[in-house]
Amino acid sequence: MKDISISKVIVRKRNEKGVTQDDLASFLGVSKASVSKWETEQNYPDILLLPRLASYFNISMDELMGYEPQMTDGQISKLYIELSNEFATKPYAEVLGRCSEIVRKYYSCFPLLLKMGLLYINYGVVLQDGEQRASIISEAKKLFVRVKELSDDIELKQVALNKEAMCELFLGNADGIIDLLKDIKPPPHYKMLLAQAYIMTGKIDGAKMELQESIFHSITEFFETLPPYLLISVDDAERFEEIYNRAIMLIETFNLKGVVPWAVLPFYTGAAQGFAVVNKLEKALDVLEEYTELATGDIYPLKMVKADAFFDLIENIAENLSFGATDLPRDEKVIKQSMADGVLQNPAFQALTDNPRYKILEAKLKNNLK
């Protein structure tokens, strides 16, 4: 970090440009003595001259003044450790004052502001003085709000939103958490905060709904990762079988074929393809038959989810989900064609085309298109 040091910048840039003090003075319409005083820190240029100086050296105003509004990740991490140690060894007011100066100086460095907010939280939650604790956490909240509202970094904004909600939790403001998160589609880890807020306000049904959605999201996201994981595991037969068997247990345990068929269909094709690659053709046919039974079953029009005994609230929250079936094509014919092509146009199943069992499932998939 550097303080404003316009004198050093003028000297450096003038030398880089290869001009004399007389040359610079002539361009700006001032005396050589004025330039000399700027460079020796006896005086500063008039504020009206700053844009012309910056233009002359072809640099920004911040660079002209030696001001660095941004810090690198390494500098931020080093500063965080330094301030953490100071909070543990120096008077609270002294360290907080230094933190405030840093925040003001780098008010547009959003990664730093986020880190400073985390520092405030980490120190604030252990303070014994309730008033001090509320004050520093409130300051942290202000920093998170600034990052959330002004940063262009989407990931940074999401983290800031989460931490803002956490501040509301520490401040005992459950309604604040609900106001922040109830109308958005946050990632699952946000759901825990929202559920806690509902519990704090006695809204148990709301907490159940948020947690159920989080469980549902986690399971379906898990199945999105399975097909590629299966296919890169075909070189290890034992591992491949273990992945497949555990996935089948999960499908059966949570009734996923009934609740969310669109999430497990890609798993079946991936598993069948893997078995075909390792030449376990009968096993591949077993899995393809499971796929065909599901793909040609009573799942149309393809709903996002269907409630059951465990996911009893799922239909109520389906419209809030931001993954999976929301990306499916809306036209039923297109969906069915895609499901058929996933098998019938898949070169991995070429060795099965003359098998009687394959002929049967092929006919079913084609008939499903009519």
Image: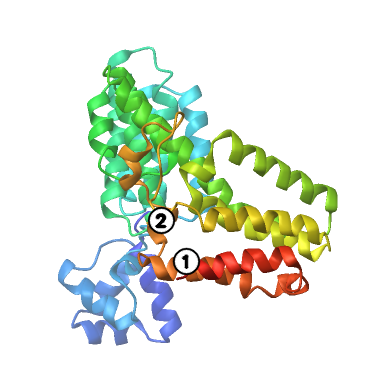
Answer few, some or many: residues within 10 Å of disc 1's Cα (few below 14, many 20 plus, some between 14 and 19). Answer: many
Element class at badge 2: loop
Mark yes or no: residue 229 visible: no
The residue under label 1 is 336
Which residue is depicted at the point 27% across and 43% down? 145
The disc placed on residue 300 is 2
Horizontal side, residue 99 vs residue 272: left or right: left
- The reply to whether residue 98 is visible in this rendering is yes
Identify the image quadrant of the C terminus: bottom left
Question: Which amino acid is tagged 2?
Answer: Tyr
Q: Is residue 96 above or below residue 332?
A: above
Query: Of callouts 2 and 1, which one flags the residue occurring earlier in the amino acid sequence?
Result: 2
Q: Residue 308's x, y, as percent?
A: 44, 34
Residue 262 locus on image (x, y percent): 49, 54
- Decide if residue 114 is on the left or right side of residue 256: left
Q: Which mark is residue 14?
A: none
Q: CA distance from mark 2 to mark 1?
A: 9 Å
* Relative side of 297 to 56, left or right: right
* Residue kind at label 1, given as amino acid type: Lys
Residue 196 image-quadrant placement: top left
Circles 2 and 1: CB atoms closer than 8 Å: yes
Q: Front-most of 107 and 298? A: 298
* Position in image of residue 211 (x %, y %): 41, 31
- The quadrant in which residue 142 appears is top left
In the shown orientation, is residue 366 left or right of residue 356? Answer: left
Q: Disc 1 on helix, strand or loop?
A: helix
**Which residue lies at the image location 57% right of the left edge and 49% below the top edge?**
223
